[in-house]
Amino acid sequence: MTNIRIDEAAQRLGIGSKKLYRELRQRRILGGKNIALTRYIDAGYFRVEQRSYNLKGTTIQRYYAVTLVTEPGMALLQEIADEMDEKNQVVQPERQGLPSEQVARAGSTDVHGVGAGEGSSNTVADARRYRRSGRGSGTVQ
């Protein structure tokens, strides 16, 4: 196997690239601009390659770095993907007798702890307004 980009690795693993990038950043495997940390490069999981392109209509070159996954890195990503699958398989409590629409509403609440039924809102803007009003603690839970 040749070295592949992380988004290609995500596709081979059957998970979304955004989810994989997010998980790798949360685990501190990727740092700024999605570049692998040195210890993971030195361990042989990733390679970082410098690439360039010409600015449109000019001869000016811009450089950027791309993180590539090696074979050992693919094994690491497979373990991470398996852990993500296990973490996301949350068993929902039984809610027998409720129509599917009510089941969806019953489990969701907005930032004020109010159910997501009619009349409630669940937006980031509402959360910010609530915090700025002095009623919120400054953190959204």
Image (cartoon, rainbow, N blue to C red):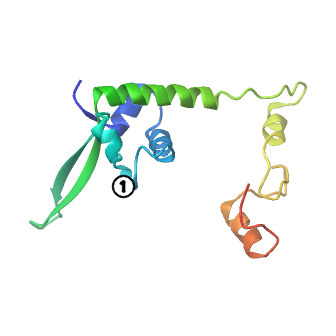
47 sits left or right of 120 in the view: left
> Badge 1: how crowded within 10 Å, few (<14), some, or many (20+)?
few
Task: Assign the N terminus to one quadrant of the image.
Answer: top left
- Name the residue at 9% across, 65% down: 59
Task: Choose top left, top right, bottom left or bottom right for residue 36.
Answer: top left
- Name the residue at 73% across, 75% down: 132
Residue closest to the eye, 28 or 84: 28
Q: List x then y, in percent, for residue 133.
A: 78, 76
Q: Provide the residue designation for mark 1.
A: 33
Q: List x then y, in percent, for residue 89.
A: 65, 27
- Name the residue at 18% across, 51% down: 51
Residue 116 to residue 69: above or below:
below
Q: List x then y, in percent, for residue 68.
A: 28, 39
What kind of residue is marked 1? Lys
Residue closest to the eye, 99 or 82: 82
Residue closest to the eye, 108 or 80: 80
Q: List x then y, in percent, for residue 10.
A: 41, 33
118 sits left or right of 58 in the view: right
58 sits left or right of 69 in the view: left
Residue 132 to residue 112: above or below:
below
Task: Please tell me whether mark 1 sits on a helix, a strand or a loop.
Answer: helix
- Name the residue at 80% across, 31% down: 100
Task: Assign the C terminus to one quadrant of the image.
Answer: bottom right
